[in-house]
Image (cartoon, grey):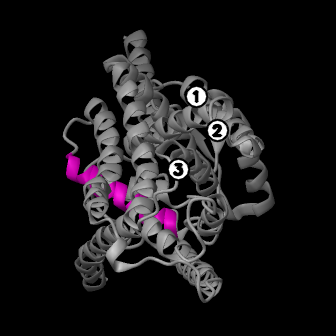
């Protein structure tokens, strides 16, 4: 009888410990908004950052185009209405959706393996918002959060949305590496060799970090853990440390680390990323081959739009290969540009590299057409999609806040 009571107490104690562990593991960590919005803004990108980015983008864009128009002297050759090749304008219009469609399709290919109910329309909107946020933030820092935000609004889990975005980015890096190697080995742009080599090293480092997160997330957690605890000590009691478990750990196991809430959520996303990558590779490695091929289509169409713009203006003194090689260099420059959307840098670099193809009198018209086709137009579509999403979030938040006020 005594042993039975002891056994019952032991079972109740173990059940209580499991419940306590589960309760600790289920504590709320800061998260990005998913289908149910918690705020009307864009996660990870504040309004001040967007406002400053937009002002800097406009100032640099207006300044560089003013400079290009001011360089035109009396007597310089300029576009003439009768010499425009309208057939190439039709080809530009046909090629315009190709870049966005290729990027959206590679997102959809990944999502079909991880969350099959994602619609292609959701991926299209996410890609447009990605372009818009890249245009308003330095070094493409806002594109990923914007893309993830739109995917989560379409019902994608936050961790899965992060994986979809990162695998698409990895496909872009593979395409850029291929273009960089071609430029180093085959192209005639010898003076751009140092740029391509630096870019290849940077892309290799990024790819290594992404592979490390997928294969050995423990190493990243081991690096982030001491930083988290150091920040907590410096902040005193304002930052609390919490026990942390891997997402797939049994409930009765001891916590493997103590992290602040933000770092804990970041580490959890890293482990979710690892699990999603493994699941993606189990479903079919050929899907990633399609992601890389679609990335090449995306990059090729961007370069092809520049060639079509040159031909539309009536400039026939260059070959397709020469223009494409120059565009490869420009894609590298704009990709790593620190200014919002590469504003100022993209136009100035195009002015320099395309000088032998585009005369001074044609330069501002060509650059305006080129930037409008490859950046401005999809960014406008992205801003419309993002604005609608933020307005819907604000409307969804208003009743809940009103209800909370009434209840209070």
User: Residue 395 in magenta?
Assistant: no
Residue 353, image x and y in percent?
Answer: 65, 58
Which residue is found at the position 30% from the left and 49% from the top?
98
Quadrant (top left, top right, bottom left, bottom right) of the N terminus:
top left
Marks 1/3: CA–CA distance? 34 Å
Marks 1/2: CA–CA distance? 12 Å
Given residues 150 and 310, the one toward you in this image is 310
Quadrant (top left, top right, bottom left, bottom right) of the C terminus:
bottom left
From the image, give the main secondary structure of the stretch colored magenta. helix
Residue 345, image x and y in percent?
Answer: 65, 66
Marks 3/2: CA–CA distance? 24 Å
Given residues 131 and 113, the one toward you in this image is 131
User: Residue 121 in magenta?
Assistant: yes
Quarter-wise, where is residue 352 in the image?
A: bottom right
Give the mark nearest the N terminus, 1 or 3.
1
Query: Within 10 Å of the Cα at label 2, are there few (<14), some (14-19), or many (20+) other Cα atoms?
Result: some
Which residue is found at the position 55% from the left and 39% from the top?
176
Region rendered in magenta? 119-135
Image-based side of 163 in relation to 68, left or right: left
Q: Residue 323 carries which label?
A: 3
Residue 222, image x and y in percent?
Answer: 70, 33
Residue that mark 2 sits on: 203
Residue that mark 1 sits on: 211
Instruction: Answer whether residue 235 is visible to the viewer in this image.
Output: yes
């Amino acid at each position: 009888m005594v042993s039975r009571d002891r056994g019952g107490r032991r079972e109740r104690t173990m059940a209580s410990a499991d419940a306590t562990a589960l309760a600790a593991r289920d504590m709320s960590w800061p998260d990005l908004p998913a289908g149910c919005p918690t705020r009307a803004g864009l996660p990870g990108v504040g309004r001040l950052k967007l406002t400053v980015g937009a002002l800097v983008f406009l100032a640099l864009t207006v300044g560089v185009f003013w400079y290009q128009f001011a360089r035109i002297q009396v007597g310089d050759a300029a576009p003439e209405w009768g010499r425009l090749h309208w057939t190439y304008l039709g080809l530009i219009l046909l090629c315009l959706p190709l870049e966005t469609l290729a990027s959206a399709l590679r997102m959809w290919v990944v999502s079909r393996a991880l969350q099959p109910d994602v619609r292609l329309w959701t991926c299209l909107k996410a890609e447009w918002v990605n372009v818009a946020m890249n245009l308003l933030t330095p070094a493409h820092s806002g594109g990923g959060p914007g893309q993830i935000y739109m995917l989560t609004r379409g019902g994608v889990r936050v961790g899965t949305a992060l994986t979809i975005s990162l695998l698409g980015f990895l496909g872009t890096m593979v395409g850029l590496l291929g273009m960089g190697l071609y430029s180093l080995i085959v192209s005639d742009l010898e003076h751009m060799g140092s740029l391509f080599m630096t870019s290849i090293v940077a892309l290799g480092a990024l790819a290594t970090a992404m592979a490390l997160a997928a294969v050995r997330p423990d190493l990243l957690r081991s690096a982030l853990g001491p930083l988290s605890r150091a920040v907590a000590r410096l902040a005193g009691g304002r930052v609390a440390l919490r026990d942390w478990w891997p997402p797939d750990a049994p409930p009765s196991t001891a916590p493997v680390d103590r992290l602040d809430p933000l770092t804990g959520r970041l580490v959890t996303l890293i482990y979710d990323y690892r699990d999603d990558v493994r699941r993606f590779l189990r479903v079919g490695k050929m899907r990633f081959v399609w992601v890389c091929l679609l990335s090449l289509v995306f990059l090729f169409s961007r370069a092809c739009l520049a060639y079509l713009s040159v031909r539309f203006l009536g400039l026939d003194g260059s070959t397709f290969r020469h223009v494409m090689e120059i565009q490869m260099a420009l894609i590298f420059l704009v990709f790593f540009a620190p200014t919002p959307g590469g504003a100022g840098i993209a136009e100035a670099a195009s002015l320099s590299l395309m000088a032998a193809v585009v005369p001074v009198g044609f330069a501002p018209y060509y650059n305006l057409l080129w930037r409008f086709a490859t950046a401005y137009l999809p960014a406008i579509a992205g801003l419309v999609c993002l604005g609608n999403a933020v307005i819907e979030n604000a409307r969804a938040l208003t009743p809940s806040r009103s209800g909370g006020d009434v209840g209070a």
